[in-house]
């Protein structure tokens, strides 16, 4: 297996080429896991100015760490980095960064007082989206002084207070993976990406947008493995894409529940006479969000 330097955490790790992507395995961005970077993006990212790398790379590393720690599959291109670094989901204050550490401990501990090992700290400051080890240590000391956690060398435990606070802010619990097959029309796809996927996340799901015709920004390339990992599929039939039927048929064969939807503009088109395919007709993303709330809630 080849080895390559991860641009975001600077570790040399095993890599595996798949299609147009390189899989980086076991670096500090995803200990025990991996992420994928489009092969032709490597040199473009490497050519960033030193200032841009210093401002951005630790955020990308932290993003990968947090997402893969929640069992998400991260697939990146050079075009994704700016939007990730500027996302409102990136914590900016020390308080918010401290919350990310509480969430990490909450995900990995079964109860208050259970130890979670973080070693070495020098390879784990991406847990708090920090640019360096010094900030992580400061955050740890702050949380300890607030009686939210206990540190014993490389072992960390949430106190009862820390456990309650982590639960109150969402706790970073692992969300249920959900494959999403979008409408063909670009305008409708944009509505789903911007207005509907965040709502699906609020119901405890981790939506993964997949496509067979080449991944676009914010989407993943089609993979049978990704679909098989899902616990739910939402398939929109607007446009009557054969890709949707293929992917949904595969999910159906694995007994993965499927929610079928179709925009009102395409509801008049003859659908396959299959009992299981009875799509919910929607007019607007807002209307569909209400429908899905009843289904997912």
Image: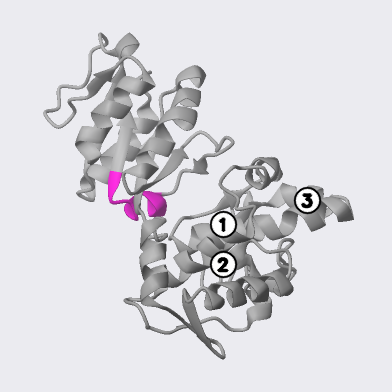
User: Which of the labelled discs sits on residue 30, or is there none?
Assistant: 2
Quadrant of res 192: top left
Check the picture and name the quadrant holding the C terminus: top left
What is the magenta range? 224-232
The numbered disc on residue 217 is none
- Taking 96 as reference, is 211 above or below it? above
Residue assigned mark 1? 96
Q: Considering only order in the chain, which callout, 2 or 1, is on the residue closer to the N terminus?
A: 2
Q: Is residue 77 visible?
A: yes
- C-alpha span from label 2 to label 3: 19 Å
- Sequence-earlier tag: 3 or 1: 3
State the SS at label 1.
helix
Q: Is residue 200 left or right of residue 211?
A: left
Within 10 Å of the Cα at label 1, are there few (<14), some (14-19), or many (20+) other Cα atoms?
some
Left or right of 172 on screen, residue 88: right
Instruction: Tell me the CA gap for discs 1 and 2.
Output: 21 Å
* Residue pictured at 61% horizontal, 42% vertical: 87
Element type where label 2 sits in the image: loop
In the current view of this chain or complex, which residue is farthest to the bottom?
Answer: 153
Horizontal side, residue 178 vs residue 23: left or right = left
Asked if residue 100 lies left or right of residue 165, the reply is right
Name the residue that disc number 3 marks: 45
Please check the rendered image and state whether residue 226 is part of the magenta-colored stretch, yes or no.
yes
- Between tags 1 and 2, which lies in front? 1
Q: Residues within 10 Å of mark 2 (few under 14, many from 20)?
A: many
Q: Residue 145 location, x and y as percent?
A: 55, 77
């Amino acid at each position: 297996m080849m080895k390559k330097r991860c641009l975001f955490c600077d570790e040399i790790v095993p890599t595996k080429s798949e299609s147009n992507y390189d899989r980086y395995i076991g670096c500090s961005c995803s200990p025990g896991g991996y992420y994928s970077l489009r092969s032709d993006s490597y040199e473009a990212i490497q050519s960033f100015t030193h200032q841009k790398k210093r401002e951005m790379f630790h955020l990308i590393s932290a993003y990968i760490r947090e997402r893969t720690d929640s069992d998400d599959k991260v697939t990146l291109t050079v075009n994704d980095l700016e939007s990730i670094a500027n996302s409102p989901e990136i914590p900016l204050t020390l308080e918010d960064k401290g919350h990310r550490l509480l969430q990490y401990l909450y995900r990995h501990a079964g109860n208050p007082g259970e130890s979670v090992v973080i070693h070495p700290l020098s390879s784990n400051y991406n847990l708090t989206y920090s640019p360096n080890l010094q900030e992580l240590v400061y955050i740890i000391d702050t949380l300890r002084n607030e009686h939210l956690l206990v540190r014993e060398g490389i072992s960390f435990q949430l106190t009862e207070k820390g456990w309650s606070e982590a639960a109150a802010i969402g706790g970073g619990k692992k969300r249920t993976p959900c494959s999403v097959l979008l409408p063909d029309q670009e305008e409708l796809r944009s509505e789903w990406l911007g207005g509907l996927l965040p709502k699906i996340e609020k119901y405890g799901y981790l939506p993964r947008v997949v496509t067979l015709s080449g991944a676009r920004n914010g989407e993943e390339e089609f993979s049978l493995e990704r679909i098989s990992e899902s616990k739910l599929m939402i398939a929109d039939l607007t446009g009557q894409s054969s890709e949707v039927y293929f992917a949904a048929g595969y999910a159906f064969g694995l007994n993965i529940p499927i929610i079928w939807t179709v925009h009102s503009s395409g509801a008049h088109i003859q659908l396959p006479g299959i009992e299981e395919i009875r799509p919910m007709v929607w007019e607007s993303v807002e209307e569909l969000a209400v429908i899905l709330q009843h289904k997912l809630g």
